Image: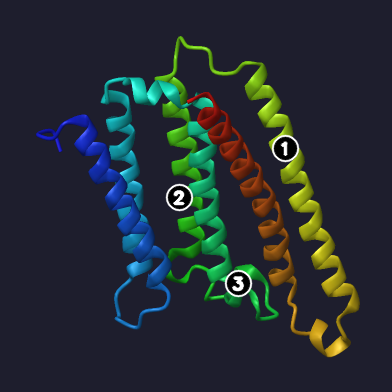
Amino acid sequence: MKGLSPRNQLTICLLLAGVGLALFFGGQHRDMGLPLGWVGTLLFVVAVWFCVDAVYRVPHSEGEAVIAYGEWQAWIGVVFVGAVIVTMVLRLHVFMPHIPIGQNPDIDRDGGDSGSGSLFIAWLVLAYVLKRRWAGKVLTDERDTQIDLIASRWGRGATTICVIVIAVLLGFSDTERLREFSYPLIAQTLMLTLLCGLWFDQLVAALLYWRDRRAAA
């Protein structure tokens, strides 16, 4: 991609990352005899690494400066945490059997768990690169602190509601229904609860930043 401008390189990398995610999410449901899940994960990770280089080299612009550092991080969090949640929801069925996770042959099929890990790693890398891009500038102020406080409250509220829903579901289900819930499935559901709270936190923060930016325009 050396012949392309940094902005065009960034655009192409984002498109490739989107294709990788599409293959990853659809690979588990296509009987084509191809490891589309693994291909999607590999394509996504490669695209993210090229994207990191592009973010470093893209010149700063006035349009970029209008969006606060916190808003960039919040929208990135919305995308990546949302992708991890979708990944886990699509794979909930493999945790239904009443066998330990380490003995379940379907757990690692199509690269589901490694794909979720790759998404988290890619998120951390992009967040770090974005912070380096804003080096020497004010990253947080009183507004950022207030937005973070409000978003955290909403995130905790969403987590609390999810926990209550799970508790009610387990507490009021009959015995036959409870037997359908394996321990690995319950564990995965609890992890999903934490992720949903984190996603809601990021979403509220992004919307608050967007609202303030629109009001100031």
The answer to whether residue 173 is above or below residue 217 is below
Quadrant of image for the N terminus: top left
Q: Is residue 191 left or right of residue 38?
A: right
Residue 215's spot in the image, x, y percent?
A: 55, 29
What type is the residue that disc 1 sits on? Ser
Which x, y percent locates residue 47?
A: 30, 46
The amino acid type, in three-letter code, at marker 3 is Leu
Task: Estimate the spatial distance between the alpha carbons at disc 3 and disc 2, rounded to whole Å.
Answer: 18 Å
What amino acid is labelled 2 in the image?
Ser
- State the SS at label 1: helix
Task: Say which of 172 and 95 sits in front.
Answer: 172
Location of mark 2 (residue):
118
Which residue is the site of mark 3? Answer: 92
First along the sequence among labels 3 and 2: 3
Coloring scheme used: rainbow
Q: Residue at x 63, y 23 (%)?
A: 144
Q: Which mark is residue 107?
A: none
Choose the circle earlier in sequence order: 1 or 2. Answer: 2
Residue ID at (31%, 58%) = 19
Residue situated in front as seen by the camera: 109 or 132: 132
106 with respect to 133 (left or right) = right
Could you tell whether 137 is left or right of 163 in the image? left
Tell me which corner region of the image, top left, top right, bottom left or bottom right, holds residue 62.
top left
Q: Disc 1 and disc 2: Cα gap in Å?
A: 25 Å
At 34% from the left and 60% from the top, the residue drawn is 40
SS category of the residue bearing label 3? helix
Left or right of residue 7, residue 127 in this image: right
